[in-house]
Amino acid sequence: MIVSSSAKPPRGPDRAAALSQYRRRAGIYDLELALFEPLRRKAVDRLALQRGETVLDVGCGTGLSLALLKQGVGASGHIIGIEQSPEMIARARARVAQHRYRHVRLMCAPAEEAPIVGLADAALFHFTHDILRRPEALNHVLQHLKPGARVVATGLQWAAVWALPVNLAVLGAALRSVSSLQGLRRPWSLLAQGLEAVEVQSLMLGAVFLAEGSCPMPAPALG
Ligand SMILES: C[S@@+](CC[C@H](N)C(=O)[O-])C[C@H]1O[C@@H](n2cnc3c(N)ncnc32)[C@H](O)[C@@H]1O
């Protein structure tokens, strides 16, 4: 069970602010993300998807990860995309229709409430800071993953304190993409509470993290 470690009332993600942010941004989002596309490939590679598997794309946005995820799970595999912004998911739906992807289910819902059916083999949280700072969203998603499922999360983070120009760039990007700066020092920290074998890399001069781990396996029966 993931719990917020903050003793103070957290100034956490604000749903209304996030919906408004992505309502304004949906039309230019894909262009703005172009710089980060190599990171998307790296994140999906780390999921080590196998043919026929089911993967959750949490906060799937306009569906920029769908092509890579589909390559990973193959024609028979399933993708479940979860996204709360109607404007962002409309673009993801158009992408699915354009490429005629099969076995892709897109849900317009907050990650904490999405009606996910069954247990998935893997989950991607690509640039989803607001979701990573919501324990209830993380608990809900992790409850829908198989024991041993692979989980990869990426996103902005504060670089080292002396890296002022990098942190100014992080601040500029974060103000456009997250509804709360809370937790940007270690954005993966809540998710890590629910995973095993967590490894975290800093990339792009420390402006971005890639965290990976797996869902705990059940303890072997004793006796
Ligand atoms: C920076 S975008 C990332 C989109 C996509 N993962 C990508 O790689 O391009 C963050 C997305 O998370 C969505 N989001 C934020 N909070 C959410 C929540 N609680 N539940 C579902 N989606 C959420 C936003 O609407 C936005 O589309």
Image (spheres, helix red, strand yellow):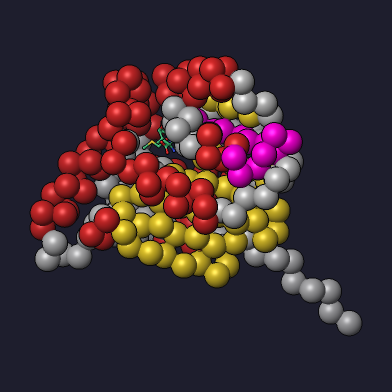
Which of these two is toward me, 25 or 2?
25
**Quarter of the rendering containing residue 32:** top left
Does the magenta segment cover residue 76?
yes
Residue at the (41%, 65%) spot, across then down: 200
x and y percentages locating residue 94 in the rendered image? 51, 17
Above or below, 123 against 186 in this view is above
Which of these two is toward me, 133 or 22?
22
Taking the view exactly as shown, the residue that stands out farthest to the bottom is: 223
Residue at the (63%, 29%) spot, across then down: 104
Q: Is residue 86 left or right of residue 172?
A: right
x and y percentages locating residue 92 in the rendered image? 49, 24
Above or below, 154 against 223 in this view is above
Residue at the (57%, 67%) spot, across then down: 196
Residue at the (56%, 53%) spot, across then down: 47
In terms of image quarters, where does ligand 1 lie? top left
Which of these two is toward me, 8 or 223?
223
Looking at the rendering, the stretch of residues picked out in magenta corresponds to 71-84
Q: Is residue 191 left or right of residue 215?
A: left
Does the magenta segment cover residue 160?
no
